[in-house]
């Protein structure tokens, strides 16, 4: 049992991971500015975890770019239990927005991470799990993609994640003692099976899964399928979707390995190793929801690759972790959340 600091813990992946870590017996301090989330998510995490575990979660509203907010967050951990590790989810993640607002992306994602690392150093904490992304691989040359594939991001969001990965390399090389896991997520989707917490994008969703679920629930008329002429079996794009609960459990496994083993820098893909096309997702969602998902095939979207699928073997070897939930589970749990919360947390 350890004292952990989670940045961005109210967000989609952070909230599910916070629940898994509370259930594992850890004490958590979450720092979030709620720029893309609602405090209600953490209230529901507490409700799901139960009254005893709920007391082990402290929430601090603040910004990772603020040294004062970070000091306040480290100070929120009980005095006899300094922060043993940080799980750093806070950041901006919308590719299109990053093209329009690169300064904001570099500020939150890079400057925010730098500020956090400086605070960790000042508070004597050198264990970090960082949310990286398969977006680093750009248009991959080899699929399934191994961690050794070239880093060649193609948008400001990806550039900012690559810069943080570089910074972590430099930091690990600068002094002994750092324990760092850079986890490159593929396409996280779904929700906790209770349907109490899930993904709550604001505005029109950029990503396939939340869009499909909003079509199924009747919030949007039809899905646009970006490209029907990709070099894939059905012509639509292929991705490696990973259930958010599998991803949350991957964080727990990474943390356990970092805390148990000598200092190291781990770089791991978190994906299932299985590819599904856009049309596979449509069919699976229709089956899970019993609702039609009307769609129209339109032009390809700029910056999309035909197929991105993880080679997940290194994570299996190093963490003893692999995904356990399939596409049908992702759709069932995502639909349960969508149906019970047609307008998300309503924030
Ligand atoms: P999210 O937007 O749901 O969660 C991010 C959280 O960080 C939100 O609660 C937001 O309010 C908070 N936040 C943003 N800026 C902040 C700041 N300056 N200070 C404090 N809090 C701040 O996103 P998510 O899907 O949960 O993603 C979490 C992390 O995983 C991100 O770093 C993202 O880049 C990365 N990632 C996500 C995906 C994905 O598809 N969801 C894929 C790969 C990597
Ligand atoms: C999936 C597939 C689309 C929407 C993005 C980020 C990546 C990572 C995960 C953070 C593709 C198709 C989509 C729609 C569609 N995030 N699609 N109609 O692009 O693989 O990855 O999220 O790190 O960085 O780029 O995910 O869900 O947007 O798209 O046909 O309305 O669905 O073309 O084939 P993507 P996505």
Image: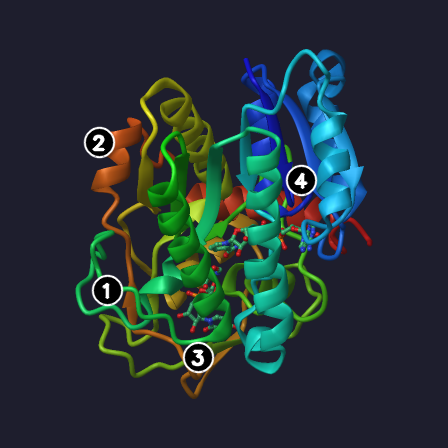
Colour scheme in the image?
A: rainbow
Question: Pointers 2 and 3 in contact (CB under 8 A)?
Answer: no
Q: 320 or 275, which is in the foreground?
A: 320
Q: Which one is closest to the eye, mark 1 or mark 2?
A: 1
Q: Secondary structure at mark 1?
A: loop
Please give the name of the residue rendered at 71% of the width and 63% of the height, measured from the top-left corner. Answer: 202
* Label 3 beta carbon within 8 A of ligand 2: yes
- Circle 4/circle 2 CB separation < 8 Å: no
Mark nearer the viewer, 4 or 1:
1
Labels 2 and 3: the sequence-earlier one: 3
Q: Earlier in the sequence, mark 4 or mark 1?
A: 1
Q: Residue at x 31, y 29 (%)?
A: 319
Q: What residue is pinned by disc 3?
A: 226
Measured in 3D between alpha carbons, the distance from the residue under mark 1 to the one under mark 2, in whole angstroms, is 21 Å
The numbered mark at residue 150 is: 1
- Indicate which disc, 3 or 1, sits on the residue closer to the N terminus: 1
Q: Residues within 10 Å of mark 4 (few under 14, many from 20)?
A: many
**Badge 2 is on which residue?**
317
The spot of residue 262 in percent (x, y) is 31, 23
Residues at marks 4 and 2, CA–CA distance in whole angstroms = 30 Å
Visible in this render: residue 192?
no
Q: Which mark is residue 197?
A: 4
């Amino acid at each position: 049992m350890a004292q952990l600091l989670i940045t961005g813990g109210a967000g989609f992946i952070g909230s599910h991971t916070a629940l898994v870590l509370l259930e594992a017996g850890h004490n958590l301090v979450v720092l979030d500015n709620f720029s893309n989330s609602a405090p209600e998510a953490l209230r529901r995490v507490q409700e799901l975890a139960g009254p005893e575990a709920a007391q082990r979660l402290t929430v601090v509203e603040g910004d990772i770019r603020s040294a004062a907010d970070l000091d306040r967050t480290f100070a929120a951990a009980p005095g006899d239990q300094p922060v043993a590790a940080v799980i750093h989810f806070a950041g901006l993640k919308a590719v299109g927005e990053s093209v329009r607002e690169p300064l904001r992306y570099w500020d939150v994602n890079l400057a925010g991470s730098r500020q956090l690392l400086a605070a960790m150093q000042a508070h004597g904490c050198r264990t970090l799990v960082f949310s990286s992304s398969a977006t680093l691989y750009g248009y991959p040359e080899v699929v399934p993609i191994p961690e050794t594939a070239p880093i060649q991001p193609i948008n400001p969001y990806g550039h900012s994640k690559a810069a943080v990965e570089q910074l972590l390399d430099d930091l690990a090389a600068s002094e002994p003692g750092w324990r760092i896991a850079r986890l490159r997520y593929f396409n996280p989707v779904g929700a906790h099976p209770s349907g109490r917490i899930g993904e709550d994008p604001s505005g029109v969703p950029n990503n396939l899964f939340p869009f499909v679920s909003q079509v199924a629930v009747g919030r949007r008329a039809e899905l646009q399928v970006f490209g029907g002429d990709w070099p894939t079996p059905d012509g639509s794009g292929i991705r490696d979707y990973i259930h958010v609960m599998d991803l949350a459990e991957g964080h727990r496994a990474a943390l356990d390995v970092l805390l148990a083993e000598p200092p190291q820098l781990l770089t791991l893909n978190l994906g299932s190793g299985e590819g599904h096309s856009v049309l596979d997702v449509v069919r699976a969602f229709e089956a899970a929801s019993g609702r039609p998902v009307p769609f129209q095939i339109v032009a390809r979207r700029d910056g999309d690759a035909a197929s991105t699928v993880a080679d997940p073997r290194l994570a299996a070897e190093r963490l003893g972790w692999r995904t356990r939930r399939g596409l049908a589970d992702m759709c069932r749990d995502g639909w349960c959340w969508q149906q019970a919360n047609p307008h998300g947390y309503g924030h």
